[in-house]
Amino acid sequence: MFLLILLLVTPTYSSETNSPVTSRDPVDGGFSDFGEWSECSASCGGGFQTRTRTCTQPSPAPPAPPSPPAPSTPPAPLGADCVGVDLEVQTCNENDCPVDGG
């Protein structure tokens, strides 16, 4: 029981800033993995495929409210949105289309 209490009050530290991370810190967003490639937009002659990822691992979130919440406290800011590319595009089926009667 004593060990459990000790772990609950011991802060963790951010590897980037070496500062304590508490539940009152905003949560910055993180990207999910990219999904599967879409079907090619053309069967020949060149088309495109796309795939996306979302800013949900985790989603940006405000810090946890103080306990107990202070009366008439303004809303806390969200953590930072994800930074980077959320859409990838590639070419596909670049082979020539067959010519009818040719």
Image (cartoon, grey):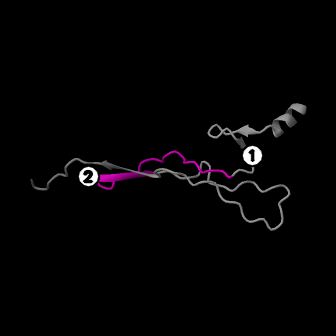
* Closer to the eye: label 2 or 1: 1
Callout 2 touching callout 1 (CB < 8 Å): no
Give the quarter of the figure containing the N terminus: top right
Q: Residue furthest bottom?
A: 72
Q: Which mark is residue 46?
A: 2
Residue 40 lies in the magenta-colored region = yes
Q: Secondary structure at mark 1?
A: loop
x, y percentage for residue 31?
54, 48
Query: Which numbered disc, 2 or 1, marks the residue that appears first in the sequence?
Result: 1
Q: Which mark is residue 85?
A: none
- Amino acid marked by disc 2: Gly
Residue position for label 1: 22
Location of residue 75 by image quarter: bottom right
x, y percentage for residue 77?
67, 59
The one nearer the camera, 25 or 33, is 25
**Magenta stretch bounds:** 26-51
- Amino acid marked by disc 1: Thr
